[in-house]
Image (cartoon, grey):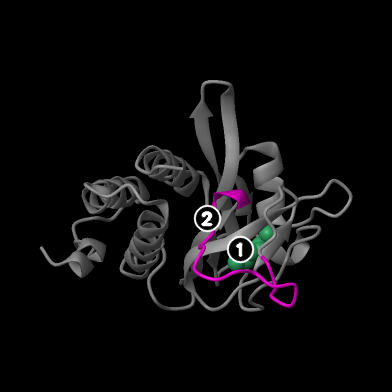
Amino acid sequence: MAHADASLVPSTITTKSQFWDHVYSQLESLLEGQRHWITNLANASSLIYNCLLAFPAYFGSGDRAVNWCGFYILPSLFPHPQFTTPTSSQPSVSRDKGNLLLGPFCGKPACQLINLQADKARGVCADAFIHGKTVIVRDVNTYPGHIACDGSTNSEIVCPLIYQGSDGPFVFGVLDLDCLALSGFDEDDQAGLEQIAKLIVRSCEW
Ligand code: SME
């Protein structure tokens, strides 16, 4: 099967539960044999995004479309190429834990940093990250601190990425989806995305 065909959604799939099971199994196949997190997050964002566009029962490509699907990650996880010697005039990537950095995504350009600092953190991604819990926002216009990367977005869901380490669970990023419609996401999407987030975390070296 060509890789792009992984994002096809058969017309026999009509419920969200069937849909998320399908995306899960397609992603499992797509990630097989590859453990680099950049590669896998890139394909995961594309697969989820394109499957949602191909699922008109709830999303599709019209005014209920998902318009963004991607990841924000702690900058300490980003590779640090050594091809050039940094000079004081070169901007450097912040590697502290005060921000999340934009990772692989599908959709229009988005904000690069999500502030996590105690007195400055705001927005849906920061809240999901700090509390380690999925946040469903049915109307982003009423969510305190919502960061509007795209004024067309009306609802959002953000699911934390949680690594189960020997010292206990460690939240190191989020999976974020935006929708053009109000109330685009519900608890069925939460259940599906949380399973997918677990699959992604265990399918990569971090
Ligand atoms: N709306 C998010 C910011 C990221 S974008 O939606 C891609 C937030 O409030 O954290």
SS for dot 1: strand
Please give left or right for residue 86 compared with residue 37 in the image.
right
Q: Is residue 188 above or below residue 152?
A: above
The verdict on label 2 being within 8 Å of ligand 1 is no
Residue 195: image location, x then y, percent: 40, 39
Q: Which residue is mark 1?
A: 155
Circles 1, 2 touching at the beta carbon (< 8 Å): yes
Residue 4 seen by the camera: yes
Q: Is residue 3 above or below residue 75?
A: below
Please give left or right for residue 121 compared with residue 166 in the image.
right
SS for dot 2: loop
Q: Which residue is mark 2?
A: 185
Graded by Cα atoms within 10 Å as few (under 14), some (14 to 19) or many (20 or more), the crowding at tag 2 reads many
What residue do we see at 52% from left, 21% from top?
Answer: 166
- Residue nearest the viewer, comparing 25 with 17: 25
What residue do we see at 66% from left, 63% from top?
Answer: 93
- Residue nearest the viewer, comparing 156 with 1: 1
**Rendered image quadrant of residue 4:** bottom left
What residue do we see at 37% from left, 40% from top?
Answer: 199
Task: Give the amino acid at mark 1.
Answer: Ser
Q: Quadrant of the N terminus?
A: bottom left
Point out the stretch of residues depicted in magenta: 76-92
SS majority, magenta? loop
Q: Quadrant of ligand 1?
A: bottom right
- Residue nearest the viewer, comparing 104 with 142: 104
Task: Give the amino acid at mark 2.
Answer: Phe
